[in-house]
Amino acid sequence: MGTIRFREVGKIYPGKEPVVALDRVNLEIGEGEFVALLGPSGCGKSTLLNLVAGFEDMTSGTLSFNGGPVSSPGPERAVVFQEAALLPWLTVAQNIAFGPTVQRRGRAEYEPKIRELLRLVGLERFADALPSQLSGGMRQRVGIARALVMDPKALLMDEPFGALDAQTRMSMHQLLLDVWQSLGTTVLFVTHDIDEAILLADRICIMSARPGRITREIAVELRRPRSVEQLTDPAFIRHKAEIMAEIRAAQKEHA
Ligand SMILES: Nc1ncnc2c1ncn2[C@@H]1O[C@H](COP(=O)(O)OP(=O)(O)OP(=O)(O)O)[C@@H](O)[C@H]1O
């Protein structure tokens, strides 16, 4: 389970000059699907993700997760932000265990899970390290493990690799693909990076400049398992040209 369904969803931020962030968004994401959201800055990508996370309320329309309405955050929908925001006084393992600890779950229940997640994100040797001893990529691995500890049905990722250098980004792409392949979690992934979206996603939704609407959906025709070698695949280049043309057209319309 992990299906997400937007029906005619609108979001207006109230204020002296109200901001129409989303306008009649329709989107269906199937169980285990990897969907990337691409679009110009300020088009409402984070707003859309925050609605699924339960951080914001919509103004109109309906949004459901596994068939039920979304009204608040929940452990079945985990969020990964650009900065992992780890607790600096806790070790890597303690940071990952933070959610279960707050929920007062027994150590015996979650410890095997923490070990499994440390292995999954390649940080077994850093279980006792403090966040200050880690690189940016390693911190983000902890962020992913922390998100997975409650066995979420969906991972909501808001530019999770946006602050990383190109090399680290590439290894994070591989890591995320491996994690997704082994867990089958639904992923909603917000990015500015066209290559990243094509490399990772099953489907790419392109949003128009404000007010944000989904103007185009592209099913990515690259075989899995994916790897960075596919950056030169003819299908990859075709998708990239198609997406760039769509984004240019949307910008022109807005100008
Ligand atoms: N809490 C808020 N109050 C008022 N306006 C907001 C709020 N949050 C976002 N907005 C506005 O809503 C619009 C959509 O913002 P959002 O952050 O969803 O876009 P985005 O596509 O994620 O942008 P970026 O790519 O730059 O992160 C923007 O114009 C933004 O200024």
Image (tube, rainbow, N blue to C red):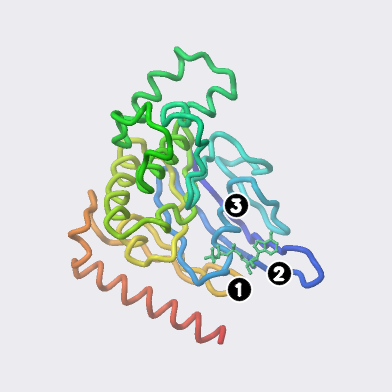
x, y percent for residue 217: 43, 66
Identity of the amino acid at label 1?
Arg
Q: Is residue 156 above or below residue 40?
A: above
**Residue under the point 22% across and 57% down:** 228
x, y percent for residue 155: 47, 43
Q: Quadrant of the C terminus?
A: bottom right
- For the residues labelled 2 and 3, the Cα–Cα distance comes to 16 Å
| Ligand 1 has an atom within 8 Å of the beta carbon of the residue at disc 2 | yes
| Ligand 1 has an atom within 8 Å of the beta carbon of the residue at disc 1 | yes
Are the residues at dot 1 and dot 3 in contact (C-beta closer than 8 Å)? Answer: no
Q: Residue 19 got which mark? A: 2
Label 1 sits on residue = 210
Left or right side of 232 for 6: right
**Residue under the point 32% across and 37% down:** 121
Identity of the amino acid at label 2?
Val
x, y percent for residue 82: 47, 52
